[in-house]
Image: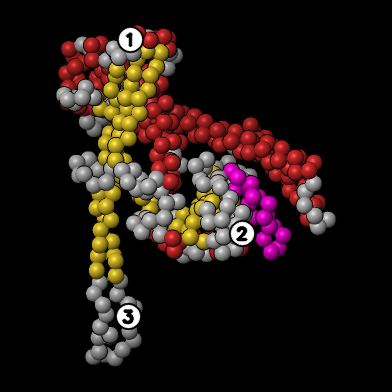
Amino acid sequence: MSKKLKELRTQRGALVAQSRGLLDKAESEKRSLNADEQAEYDKLWAAQEDLGRQIKTEERQADLERELASGGGFDPEQRGGRQGSDPAPTSVRGTGEYRSAFQTYLAGGLRGLGEAQLRALNADSSPNGGFLVASEQFADILLKGVDDEVFIRQYATKFKINKAASLGVPTLENDPADADWTSEIQTGNEDGLMSFGKRELMASALAKRLKVSNKLLNNAAMNIDQLVAMRLAYKFGITQEKAFLLGSGASQPLGVFTPHNAGIPTSRDISNGNTATSIGFDGLIRAKYALKSQHQKKARWLFSRDAIGQIATLKDTTGQYLWNPSRKEGEPDMVLGLPVDMSEYVPNTFTTGKYVGVLANWEHYWIVDALDMQIQVLKELYAETNQTGYIGRLECDGAPVLPEAFARVKLA
């Protein structure tokens, strides 16, 4: 662990200890926090949250620096060529010629391409819409950016389909009963028919238009493709995260907080042990043990900041706090011995019957990507305002595919 990371974790631990000291003092005196104590607690809690974000940022930066030091990543000094440690390109889009031509296209559109560059891009051009498929290196940057912004992708099962319109998955709808102890010549009781069904994921289109100042493009210290990729990755990433959590399933992914028989039915809702306005210790215990042990081994909590603020005040029957902040690099915060993630898009309305969190084995949230990231350059449309437009497009779908791998935390 770096010296800076160690210092940040020490500072965060001290703030957590101070905030818990206020709670312990009030509890020992059998009272609630007074106004001054509540204000101090809120101040300490906000400060430790800020340090938590700084720690995650430093960890991501350290991971990136390690990747670059080992020869991975993109080297700005090698524009248009392969990195020294990269494997040989597996298609025309992996060649240096394609990448150089694609960067020129991003900067100046089709009119900026020479004859040789047009030939390099010809294999992946779309004659009807003026689209060009991003170079393989560009697509790698974008996908990594999406994974950083949409945490579910880090844990979910991902599929890539190239030509099929959808991904069909066989499901076991009716399972035979357990075997019978019997004699040598008997075959056990006749059971009902074992039957199968099919779960289908059908990728939907996602698009975003982005405008960039030509002055910025001409004076940018970084590559044009990196500049566009970072912003599109953020915009596509946020939209996907919202859909993976809250999507309706109609022309978009099905979210884990959307009750649905094709996803997570209401039978996986856990409200017993919670109140109408808050999460309770008993409610979290019941949610944890609503998952079989096989799923618990890989399960992670997901809450909003407000929910974690509530959970941080809860204790178990031995007086130990349920929420434990991470103390080592790479380790997450924990609740009841399981990792906890935080998202701004988890529901946080604390009233009767509302969802406020989930415990999930995310391997059973499946994501299907059906279209390479495509970029269209709008060079002339915004000429009057001295801007260049970019349209990004991709196709994806997602859904929880095994209800028993999820337990939604719901208020009573």
Is residue 92 left or right of 66 when viewed as pictured? Answer: left
Going from N to C along the chain, the mark reached first, 3 or 1, is: 3
Pointer 3: residues within 10 angstroms few (<14), some, or many (20+)? Answer: few
Q: Nearer the viewer, mark 3 or mark 1?
A: 1
User: In which quadrant will I find the N terminus?
Assistant: top right
Q: How is the image coloured?
A: secondary structure
Q: CA–CA distance between discs 2 and 1? A: 58 Å
- Labels 3 and 1 touching (C-beta < 8 A): no
Which residue is identified by label 2?
275
Mark 1 residue element: helix
- Name the one closer to the observer, 379 or 229: 379
Q: Quadrant of residue 375?
A: top left
Mark 2 residue element: loop
Tell me where residue 129 appears, x and y as whole percent: 20, 24
Visible in this render: residue 174? yes
Is residue 114 left or right of 213 when viewed as pictured? Answer: left
Q: CA–CA distance between discs 3 and 1? A: 74 Å
Visible in this render: residue 78? no
Please tell me whether residue 318 belongs to the stretch shown in magenta: yes
User: In which quadrant will I find the C terminus?
Assistant: bottom right
Going from N to C along the chain, the mark reached first, 2 or 3, is: 3
Q: CA–CA distance between discs 2 and 3? A: 43 Å
- Labels 2 and 3 touching (C-beta < 8 A): no
Which residue is identified by label 1?
383
Please tell me whether residue 317 belongs to the stretch shown in magenta: yes
Q: Amino acid at mark 1?
A: Ala
Going from N to C along the chain, the mark reached first, 2 or 1, is: 2
Is residue 2 left or right of 382 when viewed as pictured? Answer: right
Mark 3 residue element: loop
* Image: magenta residue range: 305-322
Which residue is identified by label 3?
179
Q: Amino acid at mark 2?
A: Thr
